[in-house]
Image: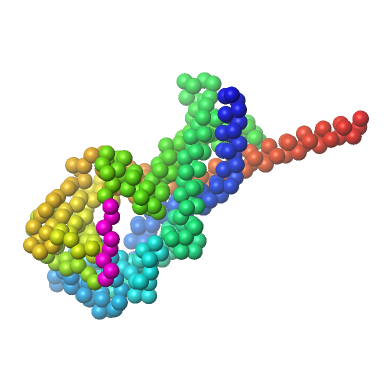
Amino acid sequence: MQTMIRQVLYQVHWLLGITVGVVLSVMALSGALMAFDEEIMTAASHGIVDVPVIDAPTLSPDTLLARFLEQSSGSVPVKLTLFPEQGKSARLIYRPRTTATLAPDEDNTEGTYLDPYTGRVLGPAVGERFFDTVRMLHRFLLLPHNRGGVGRPITAFAAICLVYMALSGLYLRWPRRVLDWRAWLKPDLKRRGRILYWSLHTVAGTWLFLIFLVFAITGPTFGYDGYRDTLSGLLTWSKPHAAQPAAAGGTVHLDTAWTGFQAAVHTDVTSVLFPISQKPTPTITLRYLTRNSPHYRAYNDISLDRVSGAIVSHKLYASQSLGKQISIGMYSVHRGRVFGVAGAIVFMLAALMVAFFCITGYLLYLDRRRKKARARAAILGSTICR
């Protein structure tokens, strides 16, 4: 029975490896390409992500939005991010007027920077459209309709297969000498051919086992809201909250909330994110980072009364449970950013290794096919001789 189970696991493992492994390689290579996208765009976009400091006050959120709408009439602002540091341009996510009526699943938002002193539209960062395309390849394989098309279930299925291949691979390579670390972590580089490929394949899989599980478990959260809410509920031991639908149009006044925020938060703030297109509610929740934030998704949340700007609630990232911190920073977990630059590098290299697994898997598969073909030829030859 155990032999049969191993054989079934093995057959499914290699079959998924030579089929779904190609999709996973595309996803992984595109993900590795985005590992330092923000740093690359920032370095290449002086004059867009930052402007010369002048002796003038920066514009308020409402004024910035009004200036933007003057230059891009019909567009629908979605999120505005302010950077209190002098000379840092404001960042706006919006739906262009040509796509503002499309369904939310169409991924029709674009980004631009605004001059914090004049409100002039500076355009997207250099390389932003390229990385947006890479992101669509990573998440939806650039298939029609992106989030609303067939690419989303394909990549989700690939993530499930990655979980299976990681777990089954660990089981199939379980060494006889369980307590010998060399059997687990040291490849046999003295061998050649199939044995070398197998050694590299299995040992590298052991090294990267946990990272691959992180990739697979967190990845679908960016394509499936229900999955993300369920995973967040499991991490925080709470029921997922139903998402509030976005407003059909118009913008929400932000100046009162901005004034209340500035009066309430005196720490070294580096960015403040304002939701704009949303269902009107008595309060508005801003998300902000400080210089002490452990990573770029470690948001603190502060809810303010829309009319008075008074604080309704204030939740610091550092005071949250570990599960809640993981839920808030899921994107950073997926990219390894929760471990700093070193973690991002390790996760990038791990993503590149997915293609290595696909290649070595094909080498093992083709070698096995060749041996079977030679065996059949030998049997056929001996039959003819008789």
- Taking depth in this image into account, of 59 and 310 the one nearest to the observer is 310
Q: Position of residue 170 (x, y in %)?
A: 50, 32
Q: Which residues are magenta?
A: 242-249
Q: Position of residue 66 (x, y in %)?
A: 21, 75
Rendered residue at 23%/48% (across/down)? 293
Location of the C terminus (image quadrant)? top right
Question: Which image quadrant is residue 362 in?
Answer: top right
Q: Is residue 340 visible?
A: no
Q: Position of residue 215 (x, y in %)?
A: 42, 44
- Taking depth in this image into account, of 126 and 130 the one nearest to the observer is 130
From what the image shows, is residue 351 above or below residue 152? above
Is residue 322 on the magenta stretch?
A: no
Is residue 246 on the magenta stretch?
A: yes
Q: Is residue 110 visible?
A: yes
Q: Position of residue 286 (x, y in %)?
A: 19, 57
- Taking depth in this image into account, of 174 and 199 the one nearest to the observer is 174
Judged left or right of residue 312, residue 347 is right
From what the image shows, is residue 246 above or below residue 199? below
Rendered residue at 18%/70% (across/down)? 62
